[in-house]
Image (cartoon, rainbow, N blue to C red):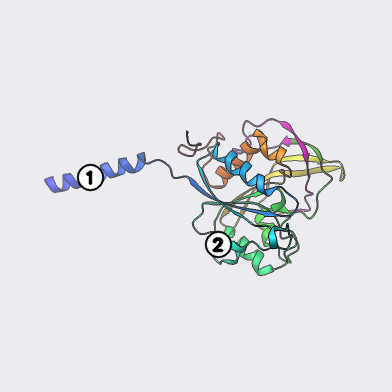
Amino acid sequence: MRPLLVSLLSLACLFAVAATNEPAKPIKVLMITGGCCHDYENQKLILSEGLSARANVEFTIVHEEGPEGKKDKTHKISIYEKENWADGYDVILHNECFGAVEDVAFVERIAKAHYNGVPAVMLHCSTHSYRAAKTDEWRKCLGQTSMSHEKNRDLLVKNIAAEHPVMKGFPAEWLDAKDELYKNEKLWEHFVPLAKAYGEDTKKDHNVIWVNEYGKAKVFGTTLGHGNETMQAPVYLDLVARGLLWACGKLGEDGKPLPGYEAKQK
């Protein structure tokens, strides 16, 4: 073999080894938050700090309320006005509450980014957002249709998919204090339930944790998380971290982050 060819092959091998030894890049998370009825000022910190302690993530946060900072259900988050609003991010974490937005084109633009392949994490009132718009695309993206919730009370959450990577190692049941149980009115085709809670008002179970597929995207969702007490609970932050990693394809079958996607050591 000629010396030049040997040298080139050696360099190629060295580059390949170097590439495999490069540390994994953080997952770029865009958190969209704000709107009616919740303490988003503190929740954005609870989530960004809590998830960063559990996974290799990097946050960009867009927090808007409404005119003059007032909590407005009709406000349209400005970033969504861009056609390619999700470009550059690995996953979108939705923790927003804008249920009175009626602009169909606006709502379908949000959903389209996920349909085209951007993973999503849907928390609490994101399930009730955009419900006034006469389109099902956001609901298909979520995996369920829900228009109302039961009275705020303690919920007993039951793990019904203990072998799913998101739920492995979680308790068979746990107490979620002072939260809202969202009513499942319709479950769409690719909805996979992971946990449920019993509704005292409706006298039946409702799914509160799930995964979904929407177009090319994987979606993780939970209707839990009304109050800061719930969001600060280790079981909740563990759950959302697992769901985010799963949606991005970075969660092992054992329920642990794939190598390189564990939290960075400080």
Q: Is residue 166 magenta?
A: yes
Looking at the magenta stretch, what is its main secondary structure?
loop
Mark 1 neighbour class, 10 Å CA radius: few under 14, some 14 to 19, many 20 or more:
few
Mark 2 residue type: Trp
Expressed as whole percent of the image width and height from the top left, the position of residue 256 reads: 54, 35
Which residue lies under the disc numbered 2?
85
Instruction: Provide residue 132's location: percent of width, then percent of height.
Output: 76, 63
* Residue 86 visible to the viewer: yes
Within the image, what quadrant is residue 67 found in?
A: bottom right
For disc 2, the neighbor class at 10 Å (few under 14, some 14 to 19, many from 20) is some
Task: Name the residue located 86 percent from the left edge and 41 percent from the top edge.
Answer: 200
- The answer to whether residue 189 of the structure is visible from this angle is no
Q: Amino acid at mark 1?
A: Leu
Q: How many marks?
A: 2
Q: In the image, is residue 214 part of the stretch drawn in magenta?
A: no
The quadrant where residue 173 appears:
top right
* Magenta segment: 158-186
Q: Is residue 161 above or below residue 140?
A: above
User: Residue 151's x, y, as percent?
Assistant: 84, 45
From what the image shows, is residue 266 above or below residue 206?
A: above
Q: Which mark is residue 257?
A: none
* Cα gap from disc 2 to disc 1, whole angstroms: 40 Å
Which residue is at a point 67% across and 37% down the rendered structure image?
Answer: 232
In this view, the residue farthest toward the left is: 2
Query: In the image, is 115 to the left or to the right of 201?
Result: left
Check disc 2 and report its element: helix, strand or loop.
Answer: loop
Callout 1 secondary element = helix
Front-lying residue, 266 or 81: 266
Q: Quadrant of the N terminus?
A: top left
The residue identified by callout 1 is 11
Residue 24: x and y in percent read 43, 42
